[in-house]
Image: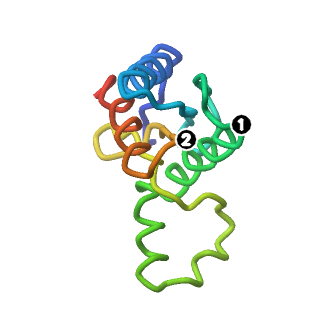
């Protein structure tokens, strides 16, 4: 039987807090979503000035990173490189900003950020993941 690591409530709160600190330090209004390894939402925080739609997009980015087992930037890059048929995949929000939380090479959960430029979303997500690395 295989055992796996999972995110605890303490982990989720640490990720949310660190990502919020990174966003606020840069003056960015974002939504932070944390999901389990199956893409199910564990925590969501919409900061002041984050557009309402960012809550849905951040959640989808976290889900896609979980079920795709990779950063969502990979999907965006694939589409931009010409594999346009991938836009029909049943995965909305195939955009940069979804990052897996890896433990011993396995996905334990994910972070999705939405609200600013793609590289800024990724920066905030990485700050969240780093809080428990």
Q: Is residue 61 above or below residue 101?
A: below
Q: Residue furthest top?
A: 10
Residue designated by label 1: 52
- Residue count near mark 1 (Cα–Cα under 10 Å), binned few <14, some 14–19, many ≥20: few
* Left or right: where 16 falls relative to 133: right
Q: Quadrant of residue 34?
A: top right
Q: Which residue lies at the image location 43% right of the left edge and 27% below the top edge? A: 27
The C terminus - image quarter: top left
Report x, y in % for residue 75.
47, 67
* Residue on which disc 2 sits: 115
x and y percentages locating residue 57 in the rendered image: 63, 47
Find out whether the residues at labels 1 and 2 contact each other: C-beta distance under 8 Å.
Answer: no
Displayed quadrant of residue 33? top right
Q: Position of residue 105 (x, y in %)?
A: 30, 46
87 or 46: nearer the eye?
Answer: 46
The quadrant where residue 23 appears: top left
- Callout 2: helix, strand or loop? loop
SS for callout 1: loop
First in residue order: circle 1 vs circle 2 = 1
Front residue of 14 and 6: 14
Query: What x and y, as percent, mark residue 38?
Result: 59, 45
Residues at marks 1 and 2, CA–CA distance in whole angstroms: 9 Å
Q: Which mark is residue 22?
A: none
Residue 90 shown left or right of residue 86 in the figure: right
Whether 120 is drawn above or below 19: the answer is below
Q: Quadrant of the N terminus?
A: top left
Nearer the observer, 100 or 97: 97
């Amino acid at each position: 039987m295989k055992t796996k690591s999972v995110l605890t409530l303490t982990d989720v709160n640490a990720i949310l807090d660190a990502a919020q600190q990174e966003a606020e330090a840069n003056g960015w209004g974002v939504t932070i979503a944390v999901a389990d390894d199956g893409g199910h939402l564990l925590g969501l925080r919409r900061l002041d000035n984050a557009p309402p739609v960012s809550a849905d997009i951040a959640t989808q980015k976290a889900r896609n990173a979980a079920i795709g087992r990779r950063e969502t930037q990979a999907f965006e890059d694939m589409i931009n490189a010409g594999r346009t048929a991938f836009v029909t995949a049943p995965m909305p929000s195939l955009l940069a900003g979804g990052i897996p939380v890896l433990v011993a090479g396995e996905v334990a959960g994910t972070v999705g950020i939405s609200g600013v430029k793609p590289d800024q979303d990724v920066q905030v997500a990485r700050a969240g993941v780093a809080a428990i690395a």
